[in-house]
Image: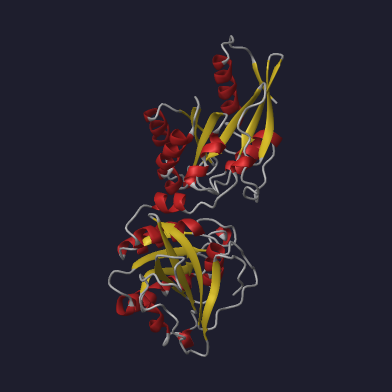
């Protein structure tokens, strides 16, 4: 396995079915040799071969994806340091082979594991049916207090899906396990899945783990004050809710199915809105929120509007609105209007949050609410019409005819 992240490393390999034992027997002891972390925690990935275990762990540790990643022979492990409740935890993440001939040696890897990730391929029915056999192995060899999450992997293969999300979730819930679907290829829910498991392992919240492990950025890259006739609008919400697509559609009028995630933390695009003869220039900021919570303060400086976004097909993204709202209210240093936006309204048949639920949440926090579809372009002009009208009120002007350019 490759090692491209300075905070990660491939430290040992088991070959020909022989387990190499290199674990720290006292994972909580801080010595001169491991003074850069407070505790070590072992996580193992199991599941049938070709379910994407190696790609899954590499996406989390190195933030890379390789279409041609070879099958693991026996096992490999990588390390990654994260923060949990103010303590540095060194994760030792074992990628265990799924080959039938090696299953006899796999139980050795369960020793000391605090977290277990069991993957199946949503496009491979057999990998799902074999979960029962992996469950027997967990019940036989894992510690009683080990935490388990089931991952329906390769969620990008929707057109080839053989296992519905409900079927996977029901299986996990029946056995008392956490559940998520994810894709290492599209970088969807991989980090969230790990953080969900880690939060359960350390009896803390997903939100606290997520915020604590946002990488640092330089506040000097942030434009703090608005230009004359320029209004700063910030897009906030979980990754993959469609913030980049919304911004891109609102500015260009186009939609790209495979629009890439934000490339730069504080890049912005300009959008002109004409009110009679007056042009208002919006600066639309779409951060990836790769920052520690304390460093989000400069990002919000000069913001007049914050679009708090969630995906109507993703319940978790809706549940995280409370955490995002607290962050915004804590860090905004001036008067700011917050607008709640339900994205991907074109996916109504896959909806997990109905319109009334979103509207009720927004009203309970005194926020304006709307739903939009970047793919179909619906609701976006109406959203910026509302913002333009709010600006008229803020400037003490009489309401005029609004033209979206």
For the N terminus, which image quadrant?
Answer: bottom right
Q: Position of residue 274 (x, y in %)?
A: 69, 20
Q: Quadrant of residue 29?
A: bottom left
Q: Quadrant of residue 84?
A: bottom left
Q: Residue at x 41, y 69 (%)?
A: 40
Q: Is residue 1 visible?
A: yes
For the C terminus, which image quadrant?
Answer: top right
| Residue nearest the viewer, comparing 102 with 21 | 21
Q: Residue at x 39, y 76 (%)?
A: 134
| Residue nearest the viewer, comparing 114 with 39 | 39
Q: Is residue 164 visible?
A: no
Q: Quadrant of residue 346?
A: top right
- Left or right placement of residue 284 versus residue 174 in this view: right
| Residue nearest the viewer, comparing 303 with 150 | 303
Which residue appears farthest toward the front when viewing the image?
A: 32
Q: Position of residue 319 (x, y in %)?
A: 40, 44
- Left or right placement of residue 361 versus residue 263 in this view: left
When the figure is inspected, residue 314 is found, relative to residue 146, above or below; the finding is above
């Amino acid at each position: 396995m490759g090692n491209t992240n300075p905070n990660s490393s491939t430290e040992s390999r088991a070959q020909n079915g022989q387990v190499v034992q290199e674990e720290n027997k006292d994972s909580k002891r801080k010595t001169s040799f491991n003074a850069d972390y407070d505790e070590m925690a072992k996580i193992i990935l199991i599941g049938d071969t070709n379910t994407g275990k190696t790609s899954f762990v590499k996406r989390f540790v190195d933030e890379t994806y390789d279409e041609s990643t070879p099958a693991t022979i026996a096992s490999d492990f990588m390390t990654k340091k994260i923060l949990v409740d103010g303590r540095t935890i060194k994760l030792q993440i074992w990628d265990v082979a799924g080959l039938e001939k090696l299953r006899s040696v796999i139980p050795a890897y369960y020793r000391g594991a605090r977290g277990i990730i069991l993957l199946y391929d949503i496009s491979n029915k057999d990998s799902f049916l074999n979960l029962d056999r992996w469950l027997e192995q967990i019940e036989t060899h894992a510690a009683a207090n080990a935490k388990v999450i089931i991952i329906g992997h390769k969620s990008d293969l929707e057109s080839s899906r053989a296992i519905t999300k409900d079927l996977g979730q029901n299986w996990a819930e029946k056995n008392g396990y956490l559940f998520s679907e994810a894709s290492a290829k599209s970088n969807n829910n991989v980090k969230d899945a790990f953080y969900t498991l880690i939060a359960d392992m350390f009896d803390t919240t997903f939100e606290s783990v997520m915020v604590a492990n946002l990488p640092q950025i330089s506040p000097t890259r942030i434009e703090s004050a608005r230009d004359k006739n320029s209004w700063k609008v910030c897009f906030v919400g979980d990754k993959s809710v469609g913030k980049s697509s919304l911004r891109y559609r609102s500015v260009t009028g186009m939609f790209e199915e495979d629009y890439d995630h934000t490339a730069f933390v504080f890049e912005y695009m300009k959008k002109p809105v004409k009110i009679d003869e007056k042009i208002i220039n919006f600066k639309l900021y779409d951060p990836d929120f790769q920052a520690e919570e304390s460093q989000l303060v400069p990002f919000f400086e000069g913001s007049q509007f914050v679009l708090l976004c969630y995906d109507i097909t993703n319940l978790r993204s809706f549940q995280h609105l409370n955490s995002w709202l607290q962050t915004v209210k804590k860090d905004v240093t001036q008067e700011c209007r917050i607008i709640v936006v339900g994205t991907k309204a074109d996916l109504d048949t896959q909806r997990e949050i109905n319109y009334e639920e979103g509207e009720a949440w927004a009203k309970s926090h005194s926020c304006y609410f709307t739903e939009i579809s970047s793919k179909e372009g619906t609701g976006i002009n109406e959203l910026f019409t509302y913002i333009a009208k709010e600006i008229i009120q803020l400037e003490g002007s009489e309401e005029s005819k609004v033209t979206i350019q």
